[in-house]
Image (tube, grey):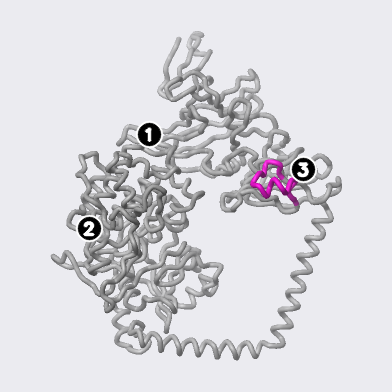
């Protein structure tokens, strides 16, 4: 009897009375695709290996040259291979997921189940939600997790197992670690040195590193944390041993080079031991620890150095504090008094910081903030270790931003007005009042504020992934933003601006939309921040004029930069620039091209007119892009950056165009397009005030 199950498994059954015995099933012989419910690994009884094989080409389903399989020599792990050549490795199962592959940890969409027993060694792919997903090995050797998007009727890439420079197998050679946050990415581990320094100097790290001193059998072990464990093909393992027993087993065997826990849950269980050079190590944000055999004299010397260093440091500190404590205290008090006097004098002259001088102004400000939580300066200082530089995570026009932890354990972002800021009480009140009245998932959430003497402080929710520009313009981190994520970010920003322009109680123009003011939460959802320069419209007002032009060059529309006119169409222009930057991965102001001297807007306009818009797309998106969506997004962005404000669509129209498949109008010439590189706009009237934000990394 042959039956096709709802899972997609074709089975052959043998009827034996009322029983049905399985004779054969298609799930044991996959081609290039692993469906939910399928096992992946090896049957230890029959020797059957279940693995993925690529197609020969995109339209030829015959067996290609790439495979993704489980190697069962040593402790089982996954490899992507081209013939017999290993291209990349997914580290072994550690109880929570695969070592060096954090996306395999539990999530709301899918799970990877581990089933190792005497009958077989398997991993099983299971869905946790209604999302349709599959794992595939492409004809050109990529191992991808795909999701079905019902709106577009297409499969899109959710995850790519090998997405960065450290994914290449054994890139840095033995006893070296790879890190995407370092340049160059390869470095010898502590206690090791390059085997061939000349090759390392030429960026050829394949020879790897060696111990600085020859090993003896009586050596000890040094702990390394936060890494992907090495290749386990020549390792041995035991599920019942503790970590202490694992250490003793490695010490007794002079061939043992390192050991680690099999299962990192609950402090570590099981034992994994290596008997060869340690290859394919990379730094990763994980709790996995590796204990590497080192020369005993090195370990002793390191311990003595640490102890001696700590002892000497305490002696030196004690002598210094004992001898000059009174002098230091006097100087600090004197410096603080001078600083306060100078700061108050400067703020009075600027006419911005008046709550120290006029009680009525301060009372008026506090009345406006009644609905928002007030934090004491002591609580804010404690949360940020007294505004320690180690807690600083960024800086903007208002001042530095610190990461803090409140007494209840809540993480917060603390923005403190700096002494050199061109902003002051007006911008402080403006930001607090604006955000306090806004509630939207794509706007940053204000938790409270602090006013104390000369201190003006804002407390926000903490967003773990910093700002959009942190990923967008970095040649390594940009790979973490695939096209689905970027499209999601574009939609989120559009929803946030639409809320400001139309759906909030007050119509608000942000006036400083840019990549640095888009913060990302743990799931890469965008949140618009920095409302210090925002302005509100009341009633039928549609446009306003100011003598004080604020914002960031590259995002400011021409009518605002030249004449000081701003409206909701000013934000539409900034959003269009931001869209082009998200798609291209290039900054508008810093863009250059070998064939012409246009800025990013002009380059996009040229490509659109030549029907080559897709060439604007960042190379980081070549694998994951959906071409029609990319081209449509560029078209919408060009509509947003048209020279005349009245030609630009409203944010409601922009959002509708992004989520629909309607026919789009042709864009007119973008702003600042002259066929030559756009020069920075200079103020035509020297009497006007200009406050342009500099861009800082968060």
- The residue at 44%/79% (across/down) is 419
Q: What residue does disc 3 label? A: 257
Give the residue displayed 47% in from the left and 47% down from the top: 480
* Distance Cα–Cα, label 1 vs label 2: 32 Å
Label 3 vs 2, first from the N-terminus: 3
Q: Is residue 439 left or right of residue 333?
A: left
Q: CA distance from mark 3 to mark 2?
A: 63 Å
Magenta region: which residues? 192-208
Callout 2 secondary element: helix
- Earlier along the polypeptide chain: callout 3 or callout 1? 1
Residue 148 - label? 1
Give residue 503's mark: 2
Q: Quadrant of residue 115?
A: top right
Q: Quadrant of residue 530?
A: bottom left
Residue 675 lies, in percent from the top left, at 30, 53
Marks 1 and 2, the one that precedes in the sequence: 1
């Amino acid at each position: 009897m042959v039956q096709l199950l709802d899972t997609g498994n074709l089975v052959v059954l043998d009827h034996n009375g009322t029983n049905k015995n399985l004779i054969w099933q298609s799930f044991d012989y996959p081609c290039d695709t692993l469906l939910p419910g399928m096992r992946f690994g090896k049957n230890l009884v029959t020797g059957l290996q279940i693995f993925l094989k690529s197609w020969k080409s995109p339209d030829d389903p015959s067996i290609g040259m790439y495979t993704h399989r489980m190697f069962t020599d040593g402790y089982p792990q996954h490899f992507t291979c081209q013939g017999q050549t290993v291209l990349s490795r997914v580290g072994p199962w550690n109880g929570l997921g695969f070592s060096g592959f954090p996306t395999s940890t539990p999530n709301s969409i899918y799970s990877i189940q581990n089933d190792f027993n005497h009958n077989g060694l398997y991993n099983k792919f299971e869905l946790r939600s209604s999302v349709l997903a599959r794992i595939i090995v492409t004809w050109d050797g990529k191992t991808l997790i795909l999701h079905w998007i019902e709106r577009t009727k297409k499969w899109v890439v959710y995850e790519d197992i090998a997405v960065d420079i450290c994914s290449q197998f054994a890139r840095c050679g033995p006893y070296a670690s790879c890190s995407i946050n370092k340049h160059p990415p390869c470095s010898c581990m502590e206690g090791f040195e390059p085997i061939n320094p000349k090759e390392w100097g030429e960026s050829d790290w394949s020879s790897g590193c060696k111990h600085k001193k020859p090993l003896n059998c009586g050596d000890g072990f040094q702990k390394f944390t936060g890494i992907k464990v090495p290749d386990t093909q020549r390792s041995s393992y035991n599920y019942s041993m503790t970590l202490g027993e694992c250490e003793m087993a490695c010490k007794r065997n002079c061939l043992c080079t390192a050991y680690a826990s099999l299962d990192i849950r609950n402090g570590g269980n099981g034992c994994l031991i290596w008997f060869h050079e340690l290859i394919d190590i990379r730094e990763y944000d994980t709790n996995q620890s590796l204990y590497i055999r080192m020369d005993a004299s090195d370990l002793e010397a390191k311990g003595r150095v640490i102890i001696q260093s700590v002892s000497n440091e305490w002696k030196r500190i004690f002598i210094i504090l004992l001898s000059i404590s009174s002098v230091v205290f006097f100087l600090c008090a004197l410096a603080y008094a001078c600083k306060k006097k100078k700061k108050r004098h400067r703020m009075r002259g600027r006419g911005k910081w008046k709550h120290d001088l006029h009680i009525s102004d301060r009372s008026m400000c506090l009345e406006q903030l009644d609905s928002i939580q007030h934090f004491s300066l002591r609580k804010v200082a404690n949360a940020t270790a007294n505004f320690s530089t180690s807690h600083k995570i960024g800086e903007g026009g208002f001042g530095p931003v610190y990461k803090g932890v409140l007494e209840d354990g809540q993480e917060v972002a603390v923005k403190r007005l700096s002494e050199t800021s061109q902003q002051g009480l007006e911008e402080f009140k403006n930001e607090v009042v604006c955000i306090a009245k806004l509630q939207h998932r794509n706007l940053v959430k204000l938790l409270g504020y602090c006013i104390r003497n000369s201190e003006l402080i804002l407390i926000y929710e903490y967003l773990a992934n910093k700002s959009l520009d942190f990923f967008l313009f970095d040649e390594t981190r940009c790979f973490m933003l695939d096209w689905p994520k970027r499209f999601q970010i574009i939609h989120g920003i559009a929803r946030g601006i639409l809320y400001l322009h139309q759906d909030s109680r007050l119509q608000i123009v942000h006036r400083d939309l840019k990549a640095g003011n888009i913060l990302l939460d743990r799931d890469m959802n965008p949140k618009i921040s920095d409302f210090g320069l925002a302005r509100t419209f009341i009633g039928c007002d549609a446009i306003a004029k100011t003598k004080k032009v604020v914002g960031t060059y590259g995002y400011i529309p021409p009518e605002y930069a030249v004449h000081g006119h701003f409206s909701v169409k000013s934000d539409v222009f900034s959003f269009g620039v931001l869209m082009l930057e998200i798609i291209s991965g290039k900054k508008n102001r810093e863009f250059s091209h070998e064939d012409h001297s246009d800025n990013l807007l002009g380059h996009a306009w040229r490509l659109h007119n030549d029907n080559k818009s897709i060439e604007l797309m960042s190379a980081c998106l070549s694998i994951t892009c959906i071409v029609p969506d990319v081209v449509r997004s560029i078209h919408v962005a060009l509509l947003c950056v048209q020279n005349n404000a009245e030609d630009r669509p409203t944010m409601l129209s922009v959002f509708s165009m992004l989520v629909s498949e309607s026919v789009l109008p042709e864009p007119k010439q973008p702003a600042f397009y002259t066929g030559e590189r756009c020069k920075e706009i200079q103020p035509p009237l020297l009497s006007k005030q200009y406050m342009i934000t500099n861009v800082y990394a968060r």
